[in-house]
Image: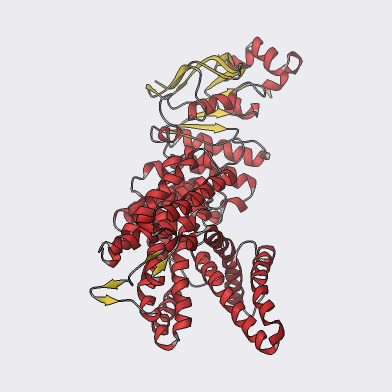
Amino acid sequence: MHGHCGLFFTSYRAEEAVFPSPVQRVWLYAFLAVYLCLPFFLNAYLVSILDLIHIAIIAAVSLNLLTGCCGQISLGHGAFLGVGAFAAGALSAAGWPFPLDMLAGGAAAALVGLFFGLPSLRLKGIYLAIATLAAQIILEYVFLHAGALTGGSNGLLVEPASLFGYAFDTDQKFFYPSLAVAAASLLAVTNIMRSRAGRAFVAIRDYYLSAEIVGVNLFAYKLKAFAVSSFMAGMAGALWAHYLMYITPEQFNIGLSISYLAMIIIGGLGSVLGSVFGAVFITVLPEVLSAVAGAAGQLFPDVSSSLLAMKQGVFGLVLVLFLIFEPEGLVHRWRLVKAYWKLYPFAH
Amino acid sequence: MRLLEVDKVTLTFRGIAALLDASFAVEEGSITSLIGPNGAGKTSMLNCISGRYRPDTGTIRLGGRELTPVAPHARTRLGLSRTFQNIALFRGLSVLDNLLVGRHARMDYGILASILYFGKARAAEDLHRRRVEEIIDFLNLSPYRHQSAGRLPYGVQKRVELGRALSAEPRLILLDEPMAGMNLEETEDMARYILDLNEEWGVTVLLVEHDMGVVMDLSDHVVVLDFGQVLAAGTPEAVQGNAAVVAAYLGSEDASFLGR
């Protein structure tokens, strides 16, 4: 961020901007302009992947705030999403309009997250991970057995989101509300990370004894991290409910929690941009593998069924290779590439 | 005026006394050193003052206010700050952010204002950045401002930690071996910073240090701990001449070391 040639700051405010250079801003606006037009040019399948990416970005960036920035490992994030999804679904069925039920879903998830964040007072690292795993299991049980609210194993039908009578009922239409919430989440976490609360979070992660000495109330800030993170996860869940229009308890299982952890590890722990990279990568990879397996199946029809089965194995293999060759995440690779092009064609 | 009063503090770990009826005081505006052999209870004493440990009996008062019931994080607001024996920086944050987080207790906007980063929060960030830049200038940290703290040389990290403690605008700063592991030049720089922050900024210093030359040169007042008890207290000269200190703390044949 610092040391761009020809970029000089004359105020602290200019230096603290998210995109300090005019060139960055032009590229950002150009990208947004093109991106906003994409639903008109892509088919429903491709847009549906983008919609899923938006939801994954919200979940990943919220988990990155909690785990990557504040150092509180959560294995229950998928269940927090579920709380938001079922709360929004139930409220929507009770007649609440779309953005309100999403916010209420976020609030419900924040309360649940706050409750399951309480053990973080005493538990650290791997022990806290186990405590949040318990949260995952308990919440899954509640989803399955609180039939009056969640529909139990039958699941819950949810109306598509609509605003002022306009229903976002196709993949193309859903693109915009999901993008708006994703962008707002990214901005919110970016702002947290460049201000008082975000510094306190990283302080807790890096050296909690010193954090206490500089005046950070450890317990209060850990709970704040849990609440804000689960609030965003709950909103992601609400969007999920409105998008799929049918939610069941098994959608929010431990596998979902793990996949969000995979996103932030592969993208880059503690990095907002890394959360985006990770969300895109983990969402797109299975689709790419399916396409490859499908194409290979055409060439070798005899083994097409085993090719599809190999998909899962390849998925795992790619993740392991990533951890070995890029342990600091995609965002680190991105920085290296940027540094390379800044100096090109000179090596130093 | 006495800024810090430690009165009959006893701290035990499963029956073993780390501190036993230890009493001493730190005058406002002074540099007071706490010395003693390894295991004498110096760091335990600092931990009691900063709130990491809670003494079994006894009282600690800062500016007349009883500290024992105050939570550790709330003591920063009362004007207490410290550094650690081994470097305890936030490795993932830049030097600038390390110092800004040091001002945490001096800021008062909440997490919602953080999320919006508008108006009050922005104005506060600007204001506190200005204060932190003064400390960066004072400690000559400007070349490292945007580097992450974990990648800096050891001596610089020690300085950043001093800066972080200073940015909380403490009345009393506790320094736990600020010169440990430093070469002569770095030690002299650090001694200069400690004198300056005491004389120019008016910060009272409680210093734990093993380098006797530094202790005797800097201190207005020296407190000697041994086996958790205060063995002697007084001016550096008085402590140097105290036979009990010389015998118990440095060994009787090593006496010349004190007068280095």
Name the residue at 55% across, 37% down.
B192
Name the residue at 55% across, 64% down.
A263
Name which quarter of the figure residue A188 lies in: bottom left
Residue A111 visible in the picture: yes
Name which quarter of the figure residue B89 lies in: top right
Q: Quadrant of the N terminus of chain B?
A: top left
Q: Quadrant of the C terminus of chain B?
A: top right
Give the image location of residue B162, x and y in percent.
53, 40
Q: In this picture, is B257 found above or below A100?
A: above
Give the image location of residue A326, x and y in percent.
65, 65
**Drawn side of residue A239 relative to residue B146, left or right:** left
**Drawn side of residue B53 relative to residue B126, left or right:** right
Name the residue at 29% across, 76% down.
A167
**Drawn side of residue B197 relative to residue B16, left or right:** left
Give the image location of residue A292, x and y in percent.
63, 82
Name the residue at 71% across, 85% down.
A302
Name which quarter of the figure residue A97 lies in: bottom left
Q: In this picture, is A198 found above or below A154?
A: above
